[in-house]
Amino acid sequence: MASVEIKERGRPLGSPVSTWLHFRLVPFLGAHLLKLWMGTLRVRFEGFDAVQNLVDRDERFILTFWHRRLVMMPLAYSFRRRKGNEDRGVAILASDSRDGERSTATWAYFRIHAVRGTASDDGAKALVRMIRAVKEGWDFGITPDGPRGPRQELKPGVLALARKTGAWIVPVCVAADRAVHLRTWDQMVLPLPFSKVTVRYGAPSRPNGDDAVAGAKLEAEMNALERWAEEVAE
């Protein structure tokens, strides 16, 4: 077992029946439905060579993407790493709420691991856990405008994590030629079944200068990817 516990149980979940229903059955059904959905998509990748280069050099990176592209992001991390005899992959930050527990259980079916904590409520503690995870060999996936927005406005957590760990920042976006937009705060994008999907990676970078400059640059890069994704869907 890794010295850092990546998946931790959050708050009390309720009775055994309620726990099984809401945090075992629902995530199982949701994850397998999403896998079936993804299986219908025709997926291609752009800019992955730079990411593969980081993997070959055994360097860690932080995938950054806007919250509205969250659902299909498992497509962006389709490989595995090893550290000694242990598997490594990508980790995310999940709250210690009941919703966070349900999310953690769902993403576990995609080999996505959760570091428990809420950046908005206890940012320092969450950052420490994220730093430990990266140093233990995990890559990280972050939505810099999550979990409640404002939409497509970057929060500084990704820059702090990169500076503290030396990990590379890799902006990424998943675009579909046919998709629907939900009436959520982030206008969540869901590709339609059997659509053509492109996963585009931006150039890896490390933050230079002060956070204001580095943050503005990263936000601009991510919004450029977002504009490209919207054009793909037209």
Image (cartoon, rainbow, N blue to C red):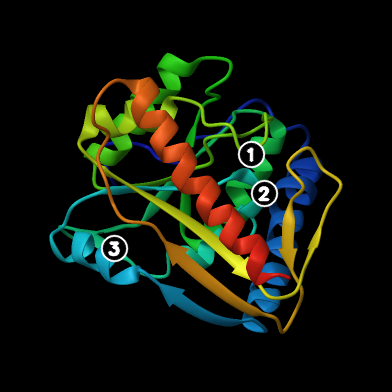
Q: Is residue 143 left or right of residue 202?
A: right
Residue to which mark 3 is pinned: 51
Looking at the rendering, which quadrant does residue 156 occupy? Answer: top left
Q: Nearer the viewer, residue 97 or 127?
A: 127
Q: Nearer the viewer, residue 111 or 67?
A: 67
Residue to which mark 1 is pinned: 101
Q: Nearer the viewer, residue 60 or 33?
A: 60
Residue to which mark 2 is pinned: 68
Query: Of callouts 1 and 2, which one flags the residue occurring earlier in the amino acid sequence?
Result: 2
> Residue at 46% across / 60% down in the picture?
111
Looking at the rendering, which quadrant does residue 233 occupy? Answer: bottom right
- Determine the CA span between mark 2 and mark 3: 22 Å
> Residue at 72% across / 84% down in the picture?
194
Looking at the rendering, which quadrant does residue 218 occupy? Answer: top left
Please, what is the three-letter code of the amino acid marked with disc 1? Glu
Q: Which quadrant of the rendered structure holds the C terminus?
A: bottom right
Task: Tell me if residue 172 comes above or below residue 138 in the rendering.
Answer: below
> Residue at 54% across / 73% down in the picture?
198
What x and y, as percent, mark residue 133?
A: 32, 38
Whether label 2 touches label 3, CB < 8 Å: no
